[in-house]
Image (cartoon, grey):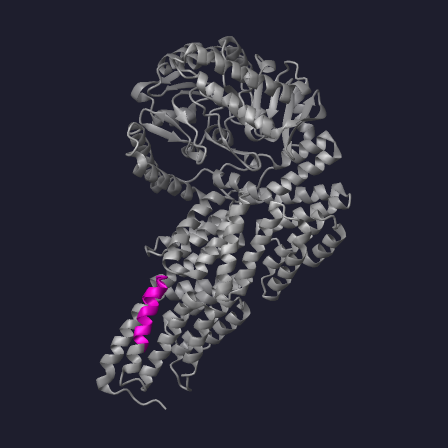
Amino acid sequence: MWVPDAPHDQDDLAGVRRLHRRGVAESSALRPVAAARLLRSALRALSSSSAAEQAAAVTLRMQVLITLAKVDSELRGSATGLALLDEAAALLEAGSDPQVVVALHNQRGVLMIRFGQLHAAVTEFDEAERFFSSAVALEQANVLLNRGSARMMLGDLRRASRDLERCATVAREGELALLQYMSLHNLGYLEYLRGDLPRALRTMDAASQLGLQIEGLPLLDRARVLAEAGLGREADDVLARASAIFRRDRLAQELGETELERARCALMVNDFAAARRFAAMARDRFRRRGNDPWRRTAELVLLQGDLAAGRPASRLVDPALRLSAELDAQGLRLAARTAALIAAEAHLSSGHPDAANDVVTTIGSGSRVDPITVRLHRRYVQARLDAAGADLGKAARQVRSGLVELSAYQASFGSIDLQTASAIHGRHLAELGVALALRSSRPGDVFAAAERARAVSTRLPVVRPPDDSATAELLAELRQTVESLRALTQDRAAPAPLLRRRRELEQAITARGWTLSGTGGARAPAQLGAIRAGVVAADALMVMFVEAAGLMHAVVIRDGRLRLHELSSATAITELVRRSRADLDVLAQPLLPGGLSAAVRGSLDRCVAELDRSLLAPLGVDGQRLVIISTGILGQLPWGTLPSLRGVPVVIAPSATAWLGAMAPPTRRRSRQVFAVAGPDLARAKHEVIGIAAAWGGATTYTDQAAARPALTKAMARGSVVHVAAHGAHQTENPLFSSLRLADGPIFAHEMDQTTHTPEHVVLSACELGLATVRPGDEALGLTSVLLHLGTRSVVAGVARVGDDLAAETMIAYHERLAAGQDSAAALADASSAAGAPIPFVCFGASWARRR
C-alpha cells in the first residue's frame, strides 16, 4: 500500500524529477548515452531517498524505468528494454496514475516495433488510448505518433495518416514543438510510401521550417526518398552524413538502417562489392540486437546483390524461399514478395521455368500502390517467364505495360532532374524489351522497343517553377562563389572552402526543385508509321543506334523501309569516341607545336576513320541527309568529323518521337528576331557577333558589359534565333549547373526553365556545351538537352573544344548560309566542310530553317 508523501521529502523528489526531465530531453534529441547516465542517476537518487516507498516516488520510479527502457533498448538491445518495462509494470496497482499506464503501454509498443511485432505494437497503443481522457497532451501525442509509425510499416496508410494528423493537432495545441515536428515529418514519410515523392519532400521541408535542430533521422528518411527517385549518389551522400551522426550517438538501430539503405544505393549503381559490405554490416548489427525482422530485411538485400552480381542462381533459390516465408510470417508482405520474385528469377536463370511459374503463382499480382521498384520487378520476372515459354508477344506486352507505369512515375515529377533520374528503375526491363525484340530479328520490333524506353523525359510536360525569392538568393550567392573560384584558380589552397560552399549551394538549389510535382502524363511514343512518313518527308535517312549485350546495333529507315544491322563492340566504340574528343581538345589549344599537332591530328584521323568503319560503313549511308537517334556516348561524338559525313547534313536527336515533334510546324509563330551575345574574355566573340549581325542584315547584339544575364533572358524570350559566343562549362557530376559565363557572372542550365518561351534555334559556339551526362534510359542532362526539353527545336553546340579563330569564322559562315535559307544541318555541314579543319559542332534536336 502506498502512503502519502511526507512534506520534508519533496526536495529529494524534485531533484529526481529534474534528472528525469533532462534524461527525457537527451533521449528526444537522440543522445542515448547521456540520457542513460541521467536516468540511472535518477534511479540511484530514488533508492537512497527516504521517500522511496511513497506513492509519488513509486510513480516517479515507474516513469524513469519506462524512459530508461527506451534508452537501453538503443544501447543494449530490445530485450533489456523489455526487462525494465516488466520491472515498471510490477509496480502498477489499481488506481495508478493513468499517465504512467499510458506511457508503459506506449513504450512497450515501441519495443514491439523494434522486435518487428507490429500487430502486437498496435494492440499496445490501442490499450494506451483507452486512458487518453486522463492523459496529458504529451502522452497522447507520443502514442498517436508511434501507432502511426507502426501502421505505416504494416501498410495501413489510411489509419496511419489519421493518427499522424491527430498527433500534429494535439502537439500544436499543446505547444509540443518536437512532436509537432515529428508528426509532420512522418506525414512526409507517409507520402513517400504512397509514392508521391515531391509531396513527401515538401512535407519534410515544412517540418524542418519549425526551426528545431533534429539530426540523423530526417537525413535517413530524406535519403530514402531520393533513392526511390533514382538519385542513388545523392542519397548515399546524405546517408554518409546520417551514419556519422548515428555512430557518434551510438544509435545502433538507426545506424543499421542507414547501412542497409547505403547497400541499396550501391546496388542501384551496380557497385556489388559495396552493396554486400553494407548489407552484411547491417545484418550483423541487427543480429546482435536480436532484431530478426530487420536482420531478414538485410538478408534480402544481400540476396538481391548476389543475384545481380551473377552468383550461381541455383544456390539462391532455397535461401530466397525460406526468407520469403519468414518475412511473410512477420507481416512484411512486400519484402516477402520481393524475396519470392528473387527465387523465381533464380529458377529462371537455372533453367527451371516451371518451378519459377509455381513461385510466381503464389505471389499474386500485387497492388497499384506498391513502390515502382516492386511493380517493375514483378513485370520483369513475368516477362522472362513468358519468354521462357516461347510467348514473346506476351513477354513484350509485360515490358510495354511496365514502361508505361514507369513513364507515369517519371511524369509525377516536375523537376527534370528527377524525371531523368527515375528512369534508372526501368533499365533492366528496357534491356529485356530490346533483347526480346532482337530475338525476333524484326527491325520494327527492335526500333519500337528501343524507342519506348528512350528519353522519356522528352515526352513529359514542361513544368516551370513559380517565382522563388529564396532560390534567387541562392543562385546569386552561387554566381558570386563561382566567380570567386575563377579568380583564385592560381592559388591551389584557397579554393577549398569555396568549392565546399559551391557544392552546398548547388545541393540546396537542386533540392528546392525536387519538390515540384508533375502536371500531366507522358505522351505515347510516336507510331512507327508516322516516323517513317516524317523521314520520307525530310528526304532523310534515319539511323537508330541500340546497345544490347555489349554490342552496338543499328536500325535504318530508308525510303520508308527498315533494316537491322549488327555492328561492333560497344566498348570499343565508346573508347574511340573518347579518344577522338580528347584529340580535338588538344588540337584546340593555341600555339600547339607543329610536330605535336601533326601527331594528334594523325591520331584523330585514325579514330574517326575507325568509327566510320564501325558505325556507318555497314549501313551504306552514301552521303544522304542523316537523322541519328543516338545512344549513350554516341550523342557526344563529333559526327561531322567522320570521313563519310563531311559535308553531309546530320541531326542528332534523343529519340525519334522528339525529332518528329521538333519537325512539326510551330503552333505559335513569332516574328524573326536574331540576337547575338558576346561573353567576356573570348578574344573573337565581338568580331563573331558583328559578323552574325551582318549575315542577317541586322540583329540585336550584346557585347561588353551589356552581354549580361538580363540581356540573354530577354533574347531567349523574344528571339527566334539566339547565338551565344561565351565561355561555358559542362558539369558532368551536376549537369544542371552547366553554365555560360556572361559579363555579370554565369547563367546556369537550372535557370533556363524560368523563361516562358524559348527560341526556335540556339547556337552555343564556344566550349563543349553540347555535352551531356547520360543517365539510364538515354536520359541526357546538360545545357543543350535542357534547351531542347523546354521547347527549342534545334541547338548547334560543340562536343569538344574548338579554337577561338576557327569557331568565329565557322559560325559567321554558318549564319550566312542560314540567313540565305539553308536549314541548320545543311548550313553547319557546309560551313564545317569549308573550314578545312575538324569542327566538333553538332546540330541537336532537328534541323531548323528560316520561314520566308
The front one of 17 and 757 is 17
Q: Main secondary structure of the magenta part?
A: helix
Rendering coords of residue 739 (x, y %): 40, 29
> Residue at coordinates 65% horizontally, 34% vertically from top-left?
548
Number of residue marks: 0
**Residue 586 colored magenta?**
no
Q: Position of residue 493 (x, y in %)?
A: 29, 34
Residue nearer the viewer, 306 or 111:
306
Residue 521 location (% of width, % of height): 57, 42
Task: State the residue at coordinates (42%, 13%).
Answer: 808
Query: Which corner quadrant of the image does residue 328 belong to?
Result: bottom right
* Residue 235 in sight from this viewpoint: yes
Queried whether the magenta region covers residue 37, the answer comes back as: yes
Q: Which residues are magenta?
A: 25-43
Residue at (30% x, 73% y) in the render: 41
Please state if 557 lies on the left or on the right of 178 as rendered: right
Identified at 33% across, 73% down, the residue is 40
